[in-house]
Amino acid sequence: MKTIDQKILESRSKLGLSQKELAELTGVSSRSVLAYEKGDKKPRQTTLYALAKALNVSVKYLSDDSC
């Protein structure tokens, strides 16, 4: 099972997006994207929706470790 940080990093990499590009698509800073991917910080609910949309995955996929 993968955690949200692993899923964000993997999904971003599959799309060929940089952290900066993902940050621009979701309206957060590059530092926030880095923190999400390192597992230092969890995205807020509204950011989670933006991440899911930008990464072409479901919110459930990102937020549920059993998916």
Image: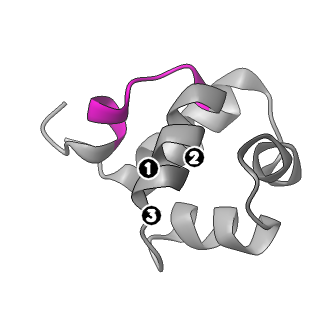
Compared to 40, does 36 lie above or below?
above
Render colour scheme: one colour
Q: Name the residue under label 3.
A: 44
Please, what is the three-letter code of the amino acid marked with disc 2?
Leu
Do the residues bearing badges 2 and 1 touch, measured as CB atoms within 8 Å? yes
State the image coordinates of residue 49 (x, y, percent, origin top left). 48, 40
Badge 3 amino acid: Arg
Q: Which of marks 1 and 3 is in front?
A: 3
Majority SS type along the magenta span = helix
**Secondary structure at numbered mark 2:** helix
Residue matched to label 2: 9
Residue toward you, 5 or 46: 46
Name the residue that disc number 1 marks.
6
**Dot in front, 2 or 3:** 3
Look at the image and give the residue range highlighted in magenta. Answer: 55-62
Marks 2 and 3, the one that precedes in the sequence: 2
